[in-house]
Image: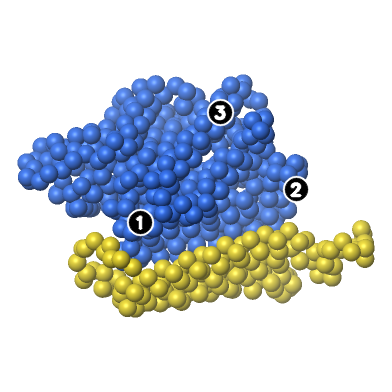
Amino acid sequence: MMEMIKANLPVFIIIAPLVVAFLLPTFARKLKFVENLVIFVQVLMFAGIGYLAYIVFSRTLGETGMSYRFGGWPAPWGIELKIGNLAVFFLLVIVSVGLPVALFSKGNLEKEIGAKERVTRFYVLFLLLCAAMAGMALTNDLFNVFVLVEVATLSCCGLVSSRNHPRAAEAAFTYLILATLGSALILGGIGFIYITTGHLNMGFASEGLGHVWRESSHVVWLSASFLLVGFGVKSALFPLHIWLPDAHSTAPSPASAILSGLAVKGYFICLLKFLYNVFGITLLREFGIDKILVIAGSISIIAGSLAAIKQKELKRRLAFSTVAQIGYIFLGLGLMNEAGFSGMLFYLASHAIIKSTLFLAAGAMINATGKSKINDLAGIGRKMPVTMAAFTVASLGLVGIPLFSGFIGKWNLLLGCFDSQAIFPIIVIIAGSVLCAAYLFPIIRIAYFEPSPKTELQDPGPSQKLAFVLLVSAIIILGVVPGPLLELAKRAATELMML
Amino acid sequence: MVLFKKLIINYPYMFAVILFVIGILTVLTRDNLFKKLIGINIMESAIFIMFVAAGNIRGGKVPILDGTLQREGVYINPLPSALMLTGIVVSVSVTAFALALIVRLYKFYGTTNAKKIAQMRNGVTEHDGNDKS
């Protein structure tokens, strides 16, 4: 039994949440049991992923990655999972957001969503999303990516619409239409790759493209642009972000946390795999896609931050901030050197943790006060000390103050800019930090230094506090001792650069 | 002339491109939510046609091993068709979900026109719409 699980561990990481997700509705009447089961599944995933990370981390650099074959069929015919450094890195990000979100949701969701039976549906979608994300991190097959992207998209739309509110339904519909447009483009892009190379396995498709791209460069170009726009819509790159603020601000706050923290990045990881594992760096340089990524990322940072400053609702401000932070990640993708890549990956992890902390804290405050405007939060820092402390630490991390995790990511991104001697991105990154302070610090000032109205407010319960403690300690630990995770990011970067 | 000939020979692809453009135009320009959904479906069908056309070989046989299939003979590639079966399932589930959302929006607003909904929403005051439906 143990041997079987060990041999098939990568599959179990995807299957476990998937199976439990479909079992949950049978326990819908026992809400406590459902909540504990979800937390248990997250802990199991954590254990499994920790073991995988241990295996991958203890390998020496340069060793070829492990791969898992479904049904024992070898690679060009069968579907393959690839357990490389990048996959393990993203899996770690998934659990480190998923577990606190599950803890935070415990006993807290019914108030926010409304009806009791909706809570179970929320958990079903949450686990499906986790499974799809894990699949995206691991898979090495083009069509598999499409199916997992669709699973993730539908669960995201479901999470957005889980509150019975007209604006939630509207936001979910806009999101669904745009995301499906993106999926159609992604499928088209995959189709062009399949037509030109005849392979759906990433490694073989990449080899095929290396042979044929000179003769049919227009098809490869078309495929790259389809994929870029398709995943750009899904991961909210600036001109394609219009669905994000509505969707992320109307969703219940644990859903916002998981959508902003994880879902957007899952699509980004898929794009990363397509661009670097399939097209390869030479092709991207030939087509000038690196420049497109840097420019789009820069515009995203500036425009997202400026839009965030103008927002008066707390969750909308955080949602626009996600658009800005996604810009950093795309910028790092376009830098095309090792320092830039490792910085981008580290920033991705730190933003996932920070943004989920911010959304959970915002959700706790909005739940307690019943108000969603920033100005209504006057003096809340003294009434809900734990929540506001988590919010403050996360804000400092997002701005990039040293000793918090955001700083390490930004620092490595800057090193990457220096390596490729790009002046413009350096200015944008620093300006982005200043703008970030401009939209987050006023919230902290209002919460701590303004007189509070005389209302009774309390910090949320113990499991919510535990979630905050986990997230905040992750932010601080990654900021003070970035060593192991940064090492993993660097290895993943080297792996990507070698292809 | 050569280009024209190529276009004629590859007519399934041209058909797919035309459908795709029709679909995307419908999604982006129509205000009615149903029409947007129909546009999405047309667009997805275009991609499916492209895939299936890519697997087709003129004069090829059906790839079923029943003893009559010769090793040297030409037979069509079944993989794209199999993939599109999955794609169709995905598309159906998206359609079902979108229809459910349209029903919910119709219950709230009494219309399926995106512009009217936007107008009404800006007039609606902020309230917690947790009614028991």
Residue A35 left/right relative to B73 = left
Q: Of discs 2 and 1, which sits in the foreground?
A: 1
Can I make out residue B7 in this image?
no
Q: Mark 2: which amino acid?
A: Trp
The answer to whether mark 2 and mark 3 are in CB contact below 8 A is no
Indicate the secondary structure of the residue bearing disc 1: helix
Residue shown at 42% from the left, 38% from the top: A99
Give the residue at mark 2.
Answer: A77
Query: Label 2 marks which chain's residue?
Result: A
Residue shown at 92% from the left, 58% from the top: B71
Residue A32 place in picture, x, y as percent: 38, 46
Residue shown at 31% from the left, 24% from the top: A403
Q: How crowded is mark 2: few (under 14 residues within 10 Å), some or many (20 or more)?
A: few
Query: Label 3 marks which chain's residue?
Result: A
Give the residue at mark 1.
Answer: A116
Distance, label 2 to label 1, CA atoms, is: 46 Å
Q: The blue chain is which one?
A: A
Give whichever of discs 2 and 3 has the lower sequence position: 3
Q: Mark 1: which amino acid?
A: Lys
| Total marks placed | 3
Residue A154 place in picture, x, y as percent: 48, 58
Q: Which of A45 and A375 is in front in this view?
A: A45
Q: Mark 3: which amino acid?
A: Tyr
